[in-house]
Image: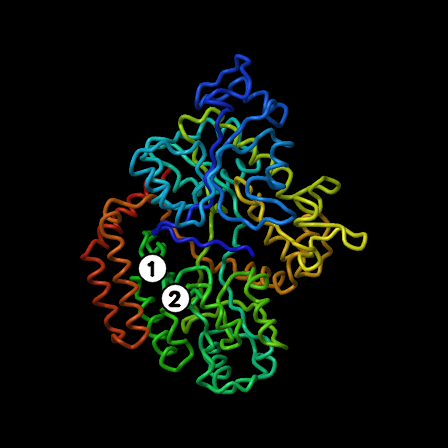
Amino acid sequence: MIKFKKTWWSLLMVIALITITACGSGETASDNGTNTTPGTVGSAEAEAAFAKGKYDPPIEFSSVLMPKKYVQGDTKENNVHDRWMLETLGMKHKDTWYPANDDQYRQKLQLAIASGEKLPDFVSVPTNAVLTNQLIDSGQFIAIDELFDKYASQTLKDHAAAHPELWYPFTKDGKKYNMPIMEYTDNDDTLLWLREDWMEKLNLEAPKTIADLENIMDKFKNENPDGLSPDKVFPLAISLKNNTNTWMGQLDWLFGAYGTIEEQWNKDANGNLEYGSVNPGAKQALAKLAEWMDKGYIHADSALWDEGKSAESWTAGKAGILPGANWVPDWPAPDLLKNVPGSKYKAYPVPAGPDGKIGTKWQNSGVNASIMINKDAKHPEAIFLYYNYMLDNLANPAAGSEYEYGFAKGYDWDIIDGQPTSDKEKIKDFSNEFPFLTGPARIPDLYMKTLVKLANGEKPETPYEKQMAEFRKPENWYAGKVVMSQIDVRKQNYFTGAATPTMVSKWNLLRQSEMETFNKIIYGNLPIDAFDQFVTNWKSNGGDQITQEVNDWFKSVSAK
């Protein structure tokens, strides 16, 4: 499955925490007189490592790695990735942390920040402005400008140059503090997954408008092709527990049909930033949701459902529409096919509102995580050596290379019946959950371009295209084409900076008021006009000041 959860105002789980230290007690791997001053750019040892492509002799490092699936007798302390890393790059783990879960690690990291405890040399974090700002303010991490200019791969440099906004969350006082980790662009863009067998049996056409979608929901509920009684069918599977602008069961597409994207900062007609949840269009979207709740198109337990739980009603055959990303065929669609024999599903574009408006959220920068480097790191360049190799060799492998079919034979690819394959259904104990220090290497636009090519019936030519043709399902290919057909409707979240002063003190209460008010309106416990009072209160309780601060920040970064 390829999925990522991204909300900038709340602290998200940390992906991994990486520490590279010298061998022994703070010394280099070899006492050969090389420059070992912490943070030194261009030391003799670093130059030698980049010239050769590995550290020789090896360096040792510790890391914090989240739980992974280990097969073939591997363990978290001894696995195919770590053996590869030592042989290929001259790096190995020492004193690595293995927290039981993300919450445990997050607590440990926050405690270290609060107490002033020395943090590890390399810290990998999601694109989260609050957390990044805390780490910068801890004083334990260096600006990476010089390191990036000297050591970053051309692939990463080119992407950063094309998308200067990716630096916004990582910059303070004109200095860059995080090495960006690239992610597939448009991978989380919203589309609608409909029960195609129901569509066919009811002779229904693709929904082009919200009115069309309402007709489909009415048919799904009251003329259910599987013979389910209306009280057993809740056509639209959504999540109202945490955020509505999220990664599955999301509602950005509905708010977009009324001219706004909730829970993010959009540009208004004058080019200023406004919070989408207080735009008048949000009131229209809430009115529509209240209507759908009243008609039973939405399950009454949706306020208790997180993203995964919302998907369960779809996979159980009780819902016919699941808002989600292109990767739904990988998860959770297999559960639908297992639970409901004869079921089919298909991706559809998001519909337009009554005035022709249409829009969804947009993952705009092609970055989903970053790495910060401790000021005391003796090999600050080491993470660049690692990531450069990943980008150059694994992100888009060359034909005939050792990575032509995957990372590791017997894990994410194997020889079956005399032919190489990456089909997870054919490989015993298949696993592609490798403890990569930077996560999987990805070239931002490669994934969607490949899906569109496959959906158009073109023959896969490169190793990457062949892997995608085998690993991704045709429904997934088609979904990528649907996403790219609506690329112009994606709405960027323009605020990616650190929490503003007023946000720090008042944002949590504003968000709590927003969620409570919206849910009460949706459930009919408040009239729709309660939205107007919510907006008034939001503005007077800090919203106006936050809006000013957000716009001041945007002008400061966009003017550069």
Mark 2: amino acid:
Phe
CB-based contact (under 8 Å), mark 1 and mark 2 = yes
State the image coordinates of residue 408 (x, y, percent, origin top left). 67, 44
Image x and y of residue 77, in percent? 55, 40
The dot on residue 276 is 1
Mark number, residue 426 = none
Q: Nearer the viewer, residue 272 or 534?
A: 534
Cα separation between marks 1 and 2? 9 Å
Please report the residue visible at 46 percent of the width from the left and 46 percent of the height from the top.
Answer: 15
250 or 551, which is in the foreground? 250
Q: Quadrant of the C terminus?
A: top left
Q: Relative to 302, is 165 above or below?
A: above
Q: Secondary structure at mark 1?
A: helix
Residue, disc 2: 255
> Which one is earlier in the sequence, the residue at label 1 or at label 2?
2
Instruction: Depth check: give the residue in front, 301 or 533.
Output: 301
Q: Which quadrant of the structure image shows residue 302?
A: bottom left
Q: Residues within 10 Å of mark 2 (few under 14, many from 20)?
A: many
Residue 244 position, x and y percent, is 38, 63
- Against 68, residue 373 (above or below) is above
Apparent side of residue 342 relative to residue 239 in the rendered image (left or right): right
Q: Secondary structure at mark 2?
A: helix
> From this viewpoint, which residue is outermost toward the right?
418
